[in-house]
Amino acid sequence: MPVPVHFADLRSRSTRTNTESKIARLCDAAGLSAAVAKGDLVAIKIHFGEPGNHTFVPPWFARVVADKVREAGGRPFFADTNTLYKGGRSDAQVHLESAARHGFVPEVLGAPVLIADGLKGSDWREVPVDGKWFKAAKVAGGFLDADAMIVISHVKGHGMAGFGGAIKNIAMGCSPPAGKREQHCMKFEVRSAKCTACGACIEWCPTGALGREGGDPSDRKAKALVDKAKCIGCGECLLHCKFDAIGMDWNADIPEFTEKMTEYALAALHGKKGKAFFLNFVTDVIPDCDCTPWSDAAVVPDQGILASTDPVAIDAASVDLVRAAPVARGSALEGKAEAGDDKFAALHPESRGLLQLEHGEKIGLGSRDYELKPL
């Protein structure tokens, strides 16, 4: 039987049809209250956005979800985990500062904000997972200790995952840096002929694996060089290089990465059977992740918001909405794709985004067979 995925478009002509009202109605229609018992501590997993990015799901929409959790008798809190790379979310102190900068504060959200893996990412436990690559995975303590979890995801592209939705949000977002490192399996190299010596990859590398040829960091004309013994495969160099100067074995590494990430999503839901709920915002569908300190133009018009109890089904529906949509004028896909094309594959041809759905179904994370149910 197809999994119901509830959908609200973004047309609005009254208070009843404004976006906040539609989010509340989606929560009711898709059964958020069934995942929340009276007194439950409910983690609302959300991405606070890297400083410089502005396409994350805004806090005033997230507040509606917290209000629905309280209405169901739960005690909500908003949470994310620390990043593997350098930047504005690499430990709890700077992460909370970045969250506040984007409006994720109790006064706006109506609920507390915490970093689920602790000050420096050391608050985690291993949980069993029956996967192809993992038999155990590291999940942040704050998510494991929560009685229920509501997952708010912004759908967008991603250079390695192909796209980011609910699966990627809980896989990377519920794991500490040590768990993120387990999911990344690539070893990168610099294509010297394309390197402009800009140094962006060096700045964002969390392990010092990237330096300059000749070993002199002050030589701004020296091109980048990877020490593969130090490389942890986080992909920040790939993400921040705008000259296609970072290479890897896409055919071998990307399928493994995608399957590992999907298995971590299964681990993130450990102990949450019947206690998880998902909302996907198919809005501001940009080429790259909200982890980047910028936001490119959206590649398709805003489609709407989805709600389901199944992370695979809601991601499948999101991909299909983006596929069917026309390409936005002036975007990275103008002239490169059209309605009916796989936009994420067009953005990142060497990625394997749909493998998230295929492998997720195979390991029992969810079902690709869904029925779209408009409000």
Image (cartoon, helix red, strand yellow):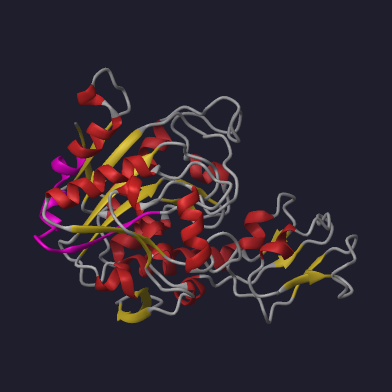
Q: Residue at x 19, y 67 (%)?
A: 147
Q: Residue at x 49, y 64 (%)?
A: 255
Q: Is residue 313 above or below residue 38?
A: above
Q: Nearer the viewer, residue 85 or 312?
A: 85
Give the percent coordinates (x, y) of residue 62.
32, 45
Q: Is residue 296 above or below residue 278?
A: above
Q: Residue at x 55, y 47 (%)?
A: 288
Total numbered labels placed on residues in the image:
0
Residue 115 visible in the displayed image: yes
Farthest residue in the top direction?
A: 13
Q: Is residue 271 above or below residue 168?
A: below
In the picture, measured across the screen, residue 372 lies left or right of residue 115, that is left
Residue 316 visible in the displayed image: no
Q: Residue at x 16, y 44 (%)?
A: 30
Q: Quadrant of the C terminus?
A: top left
Q: Nearer the viewer, residue 207 or 371?
A: 207
Span highlighted in magenta in the image: 26-46
Residue 6 image-quadrant placement? top left
Q: Nearer the viewer, residue 212 or 368?
A: 212
Magenta-drawn stretch contains 3? no
Q: Nearer the viewer, residue 56 or 274?
A: 56
Give the percent coordinates (x, y) of residue 40.
15, 64
Farthest residue in the front direction?
A: 107
Give the percent coordinates (x, y) of residue 154.
40, 46
Residue 333 image-quadrant placement? top right
Give the percent coordinates (x, y) of residue 209.
70, 74
Magenta-drawn stretch contains 45? yes
